[in-house]
Image (cartoon, rainbow, N blue to C red):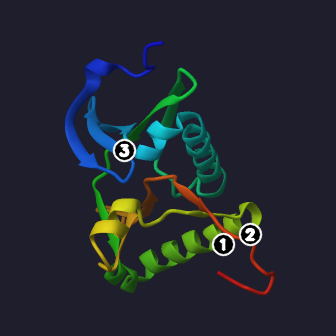
Amino acid sequence: MQPPYDKRKVGRFFALGGEHLVYRYGSGQLIELPFALRYFIDKKHYCENVRRGYELYQKYFKDSFLSTELMFYDDDEYAIIQKLLSARVLKKSDLREQSVARDFERIVSISKKMADAEHLMPDFFGGWRLLFSGVTHTVGNVLIEHETKRLTLIDFGVFGMAERESNNKL
């Protein structure tokens, strides 16, 4: 089966994510294509996890999650298309601004609700940021939009948690 996206719109390489190669796609969009080792080892299970993460972000972070089109084809192939934002990675120093701090606190509160209900946590940092940049006081999967200062989640990765005791808070 042919991919459901238009291959003619795939443009220049844009970025390397923790598990995706990111290219410009048409005008004002990006396309992410999987390249993670664990994807190639077990595509079906990996795709199930991608679908689950996407569904959870739609459910819990609808107001903060970047408009995203997730396309599956051939049961174990997918592509992600997202709007290209005018934004940058959230830094610790951004939290000095009251509106940004409130937005961040709201996102953290939602993540706690998701953790309690689903026993899964959102991946706000991103794999490459944790592996290669050390402690930089940035959050790789949370962007702050240049014009509005609004926080936007750009990735929908989740990771599992062990059962927590009811009195143990995040």
Residue 94 drawn at (x, y percent): 34, 79
Decide if residue 59 is on the left or right side of residue 155.
right
Q: Nearer the viewer, residue 10 or 147?
A: 10
Image depth: mark 3 or mark 2 in front: 3
Q: Considering depth in this image, is 52 or 59 the residue closer to the camera? A: 52
Residue at left offset 52%, top offset 58%: 64
Residue 76, compared with residue 68, is above or below; it is above
- Spatial distance from mark 3 to mark 2, Cα to Cα? 28 Å
- Residue bearing mark 1: 112
Question: Looking at the image, which is closer to me, 10 or 165?
Answer: 165
In this rendering, would 77 be left or right of 62?
A: left
What element does badge 3 sit on?
Answer: strand
Disc number for residue 116: 2
Q: CA distance from mark 1 to mark 2?
A: 6 Å
Q: Amino acid at mark 2?
A: Asp
Front-lying residue, 79 or 143: 79
Residue with the mark numbered 3 = 20
Q: Secondary structure at mark 1?
A: helix
Task: Classify mark 3: residues with Cα within 10 Å, few (<14), some (14-19) or many (20+).
Answer: some
Q: Choose top left, top right, bottom left or bottom right for residue 47.
A: top right
| Amino acid bearing label 3 | His
Q: Amino acid at mark 1?
A: Lys
